[in-house]
Amino acid sequence: MTIPNLISLVRILIAPIFLFLFIGSDKKFVALACVLFLIGALSDYFDGWYARKYKQSSKWGIFIDPLADKVLTSAALVAFVLKDIIPFWMIIIIIIRDLFITFLRLFADSHEMPIITSQNAKIKTFAQFTLFGYAMAVYFFTNLGYLSFENLNQLVYNQYVWLANLALTCFTVYTMIEYIFHNKLVISKLFGIK
């Protein structure tokens, strides 16, 4: 169990705590949830940097790191649906994609087949954390009283955030198509195609 893998596990543990605090009515807990999410998002960069710098990459780490990202982003997506920031159908598409990719990784690993991760999948995760981090920052300052709820409506509940989420949803679908294309051998094995 290396430090990068421990950081990834902490990110998984943060997800349900963040969700529980964020959907509550206590303003301080909502602010704390935003801080937890930002810590989780930043840890995604840190564990990768640490693994590369100290040569602590492992087979388990290659699996657990993207899984931790998916768990944290899924928690944020559910929270945003419950807060009416994004529509339900968007998170269904994203979560189905994430479940499919996770299953594909597990299948490939169980058959000792390599899985190819595209650069666009990493860009997608970074873009999600950036957009979610923006919304969390607005919620954080609103719940601490530095911004009014009118500001919150103007900064988060607007067509630009909705369009950004739509673009991310479309990009997420594109990354799934990329995964399928780049991992044709795994897909063929999975569906018994010769």
Image (tube, helix red, strand yellow):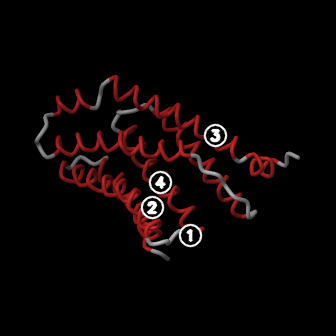
Going from N to C along the chain, the mark reached first, 1 or 4, is 1
Residue at 28% across, 44% down: 136
Name the secondary structure under disc 1. loop
Q: CA distance from mark 2 to mark 1?
A: 11 Å
Q: Which-is-in-front pick, marks 3 and 4?
A: 3
Task: Using a 10 Å C-alpha cutoff, classify the residue at mark 3 as few (fewer than 14 neighbours), some (14 to 19) or many (20 or more).
Answer: some
Tell me: residue 175, above or below residue 37: above
Q: CA distance from mark 1 to mark 4?
A: 20 Å
Tell me: residue 41, above or below residue 112: above
Q: Which residue is mark 1?
A: 58
Q: Nearer the viewer, residue 93 or 41?
A: 41
Going from N to C along the chain, the mark reached first, 2 or 1, is 2
On screen, residue 3 versus residue 148, left or right, reads right
Q: CA distance from mark 2 to mark 4?
A: 17 Å
Q: CA distance from mark 3 to mark 4?
A: 21 Å
The three-letter code of the residue at mark 4 reads Val
Q: Nearer the viewer, residue 21 or 134?
A: 134
How far from the left and from the top, in percent, is residue 131? Answer: 36, 39
Q: Which residue is mark 3?
A: 178
Q: CA distance from mark 3 to mark 2?
A: 22 Å
Task: Using a 10 Å C-alpha cutoff, classify the residue at mark 2 as few (fewer than 14 neighbours), some (14 to 19) or many (20 or more).
Answer: some
Residue at 44% across, 72% down: 54
The three-letter code of the residue at mark 2 reads Gly
Q: CA distance from mark 3 to mark 1?
A: 24 Å
Q: Which residue is mark 2?
A: 48
Name the secondary structure under disc 2. helix
The three-letter code of the residue at mark 3 reads Glu
How far from the left and from the top, in percent, is residue 45? Answer: 39, 57
On screen, residue 185 versus residue 143, left or right, reads right
Name the secondary structure under disc 4. helix
How far from the left and from the top, in percent, is residue 12? Answer: 44, 61
Q: Which residue is mark 4?
A: 71
